[in-house]
Amino acid sequence: MLKIGLIGGQLGEKVSETPYRKWMENVSPGYYDKEEGAYLFEPSLAAAIEDKYKGTEVKYTTTLNETQLQKNDVNFLVGKNLLNYWEKSPEEYKKAYNIMKNKKNNIYPPLKEQFFLYNKGDYLKYYEKKGIPIAPTFLIKKNRNVKTIINTVKKHNWEAFVMKPYYAYANASIKRFDMHDPKLFTNVSKYLDKNKKYPAFICQEVMVGFMTKWEVKSFWINGKYAYHISTKACDQVFDEDDIYGECPDDIGEVNDKIVRQVKRYGKKVIQYYPSDKPSPPLYLRIDFGCCGGNTLNTSKYFLNEIEYAGCGIYLEIKNTLSLWVKGYYEKAKELTNYIKRSPLHMRQVSRKNISRRRTTRRKSIRSRKRTPRR
């Protein structure tokens, strides 16, 4: 029996009830939204995996219960990650950190991979060195002197810039600043003071391509391109008056040339991803923006962001549940085999076998002592 845990509760994504699928009968009514005619993603994923792959037991949970975690062969962070606890309180964060650090709890992805993605500016600079284009960027860490930041922007000749904090998600605390604003110094000071809890910031030139061009969010499951969606991020960095027309909420389409760019750079992201395991990560959402050189040239897409657990996967747009079912199951099998071959697991098995042999020997000795002589 392959035992899988799915840890979620923050994502809120749903799976449509149409078309009907047999696994829906096994989802608790509490996870069904009658108004939307849809089931919550994580329990749907659990039911669908159990339905498709016999010999599996999948438990969905919203808490980090170590007793339950250690009963599973692997526990995936699906709709929740360490940052959700960091946002709550230092105590919640420390508790979750220690649970995720304990290898007996079999949590995936490991902390090393999680922190690689939380430190956004660091991974952007890392991938830039690997030949993947990014937007013009400098990092703000311990030195948060406002005058130094503004002077650095001036040296780059940027007309406007955005600041994005490390450890933030879902576009939280992203702020645009214009160099011609007479209150620039005050506004930057207020922003840094308000967001001083964050360990660092990315400072990037405002890219005009976000006004009119599609941002492409690509999904990679077990190292392979699965699908993409195209959205507009214009309202995150531009005022309404600056946008050419309204910023649409719907999903668009990009041409094959752009998709080929996304796939080419996405493969390089996977290739250089610093995984603890000898295989690609279960999934990454790799987002690409337009356009390099701050032009409107769609042949110059650049790496904008990489996300994992807790990011939107747009199931309401793309009917891709079957891809996730297969991906999670295959990664669970792979990780279970990897864990069983690890030195720690072998030592634990060895100790159990020694203890079992000693118990058997003691029982045998007691049995012989009780047996009367003839």
Image (cartoon, rainbow, N blue to C red):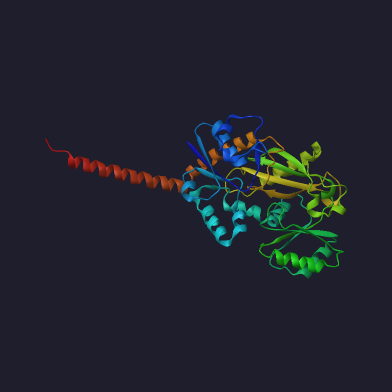
Q: Nearer the viewer, residue 192 or 296?
A: 192
Which residue is at a point 75% across and 67% down the rendered structure image?
190
Name the spot of residue 282 as percent of width and height, x first. 61, 42
Residue 150 drawn above or below residue 134:
below
Q: Can residue 123 be spotted in the picture? A: yes
Residue 330 drawn above or below residue 131:
above
Name the spot of residue 4 as percent of width and height, x first. 52, 41
Which residue is at a point 53% across and 38% down the rendered structure image?
333
On screen, residue 241 versus residue 191, left or right, reads right
Which residue is at a point 50% across and 53% down the rendered structure image?
102
Name the spot of residue 85 as percent of width and height, x first. 59, 56
Q: Using the rendered view, name the quadrant where residue 231 is placed.
A: top right
On screen, residue 226 versus residue 57, left or right, reads right
Q: Nearer the viewer, residue 60 or 106?
A: 60
Q: Using the rendered view, name the quadrant where residue 220 is placed.
A: top right
Residue 231 drawn above or below residue 163:
above
Name the spot of residue 175 as percent of width and height, x first. 77, 59
On screen, residue 10 versus residue 261, left or right, reads left
Which residue is at a point 60% across and 47% down the rendered structure image?
9
